[in-house]
Amino acid sequence: MTEAEESLVSFKDLSVSYGLVQALSGVSGTIHAGPTGLLGPNGAGKTTLLKTLLGFLSPDRGRMTAFGLDPTREPLEVRRRVGYLPEQDCHLPGMTAATFVAFAGELSGLPRAEAISRAHEVLYYVGLGEARYRNVETYSTGMKQRAKLAQALVHDPDLLLLDEPTNGLDPQGRDEMLSLIHDIATRRGMSLVLCSHLLRDVERVCDDVIVLNQGRVARTGTIAELTGPRRQVFDVRLKGDPAAFLTDLRDLGGEWREGEDGHRVFLPEGHGPETVFRLARECGVQVRHLRPGAETLEDVFLRALGHEIQG
Amino acid sequence: MPIYDQGYRRYEARAPLRRLRSWPITREALRLILVKRAFLGLLVVSFLPFLIRVGQIYVVTRFPEAGRMLPVDGRLFGEFLNQQIFFTILLSIFGGAGLIANDLRTGAILVYLSRPLTRRDYALGKLGVLLALNLAVTLVPGLLLYAVALGLAPEPFLHWSQGWIGPAIVVHAFVISVVVSFVALAVSALTRSARVAGLAFFGLVFGLELVRVVLQQGFGRREAMLLSLQADLQAIGQALFGLPPTGPSLHWTWPVLVLVLAGLACVGVLRSRVRAVEIIT
């Protein structure tokens, strides 16, 4: 299978603007089958990319294809194969979850009887089986998120677009939602795009990641590639003034950033923990704690955004 | 049961897209409106003029001399439909104010537009709700009244020269329903609050009617009739059914022109407001 056949969505040199505001400028990338993370701070252009994929926005420049179709020219064909969980609250006033999800299925083209049957199945799947005859307006935030997920799933889309699905959830609710998304991606084999500014959410669910910043693609690749053992990473706690140590580290080609308890140190290739001890000795500081670590998605993210990591 | 163990069935039998994609929108919105008892009460009340007119036809057939005070001819249907304009406005306020406003408030518009539906499908689906309600109190009782008239008084009505009454009822009922529905829907799209939309539609219709009355009766300005939606619709009814004008009026082409322009303005409002993405420039 060629890369073009395997990719669900591809975009090249894509620029999208809201009036005078440039939301995406010349982004290129590919979304393959499987779970893909779309990562970036608020205003990075993540939602704009999803809305362009749904055919809501027309690109000023460049081209996007989804399932080999142009979302601008054939939005209906694209949308029938996509399930979308919007970031903001969305429910139909006066409807129970069962009616709401069945109605969503019908709007997606399912026959009425099939839509009703699938609505009940999907509501059980997302954990709202017992509450499916309650009005969605009376739901908690977590339940509303699940109802939104159910309406996105009801027609069994080829690609699920999840825009900040854990927004507003407490830790337990978030954990359950991520478990559910992970299950959809792994056991049910559905491709999905998880759009989030929360690194841990993406790290838990996705294989591939696209990092967006200020309307541009900052990094792209598999999480393994981006966080792989390319660099030696250590969490270091020092006793004494660390300024000289950090300056010497930078001169050596290393990087560092403030950690929760000390510093996270990134050593250039070919260097190991002995370099940390040597630099500390030379600068007159004591190493009180040294723990090897892997470069996390958060490190990649911050590096991609070009700030916070010093070096 | 943990969520992992719960089933999820893949659905492979994807059917081609429906031709009438707006139908589920109309059906669900009608269902939600018609479960409200107060609304059903209003629908029942809006049939009272029909019953009164049936009574009028019955009385005149039994006591022909009553026909001098209550004439039963083609004009009766025009007068009846012009009265029903008031009920279409009430039904549109209570049934239509929230149709788009609520979707904008709750974000439901994204549920619709992220599906294989165009903005036109969505607007047509919502328009269908108001059209169904308004035709239910204009076309349905209008044609029923005509059937009653044919049954009770065949002599004046079952005649070739009176053949225009049926088509005139259909045309006037559609003109009233389409115009009132379009304006109510456009007003609903202008705000995120059903209450504000209802008040705005009420103010637009009855406020302009008040201005018309003041200008026409106080200053004798006959062109003031163009300001009022009700007066414009009534003028078309008067032209269709040969009714005498109730005050100083213009030729029927003027109200038609005003209503066409109002319709275009409504389409413009719907085009700009029914969007999945709000673009602020």
Image (tube, coloured by chain):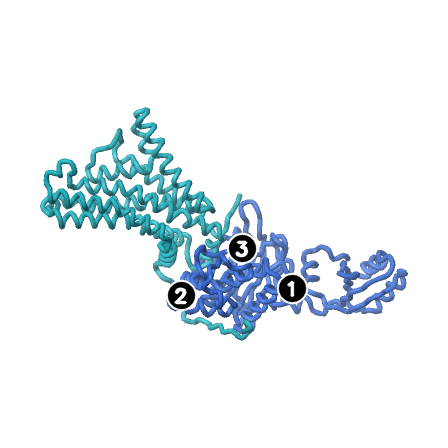
Chain colours: A blue, B cyan
Please determine whether, in this image, residue A139 is positioned above or below residue B96.
below
Residue pointed to by mark 1? A200
Of the residues under marks 1 and 2, which one precedes in the sequence?
2
The reply to whether callout 2 and callout 3 are in contact (CB within 8 Å) is no
User: Distance of mark 2 from mark 3, alpha carbons?
Assistant: 25 Å
Packing grade of label 2 (10 A; few <14, some 14-19, many >=20) is many
User: Distance of mark 1 from mark 3, alpha carbons?
Assistant: 21 Å
Q: Locate residue B15 relative to residue A30 in the image: left or right.
A: left
Residue at left offset 46%, top offset 53%: B109
Residue B105 visible here: yes
Residue B15 lies, in percent from the top left, at 38, 67
Residue A138 lies, in percent from the top left, at 50, 58
Q: Locate residue A234 relative to residue B42 in the image: left or right.
A: right
Marks 2 and 3 belong to one chain: yes
Instruction: Report which quarter residue B70 is drawn in.
Output: top left
Q: Locate residue A135 relative to residue A3 in the image: left or right.
A: left
The reply to whether callout 1 and callout 3 are in contact (CB within 8 Å) is no
Say which element carries label 1.
Answer: helix
What is the count of numbered marks?
3
Q: Chain of mark 1?
A: A
Residue B22 visible here: no
Packing grade of label 1 (10 A; few <14, some 14-19, many >=20) is few
Q: Chain of mark 2?
A: A
Residue pointed to by mark 2? A110
Please determine whether, in this image, residue B239 is positioned above or below residue B139.
above
What quarter of the picture does the N terminus of chain B occupy? Answer: bottom right
Q: Chain of mark 3?
A: A
Residue pointed to by mark 3? A88
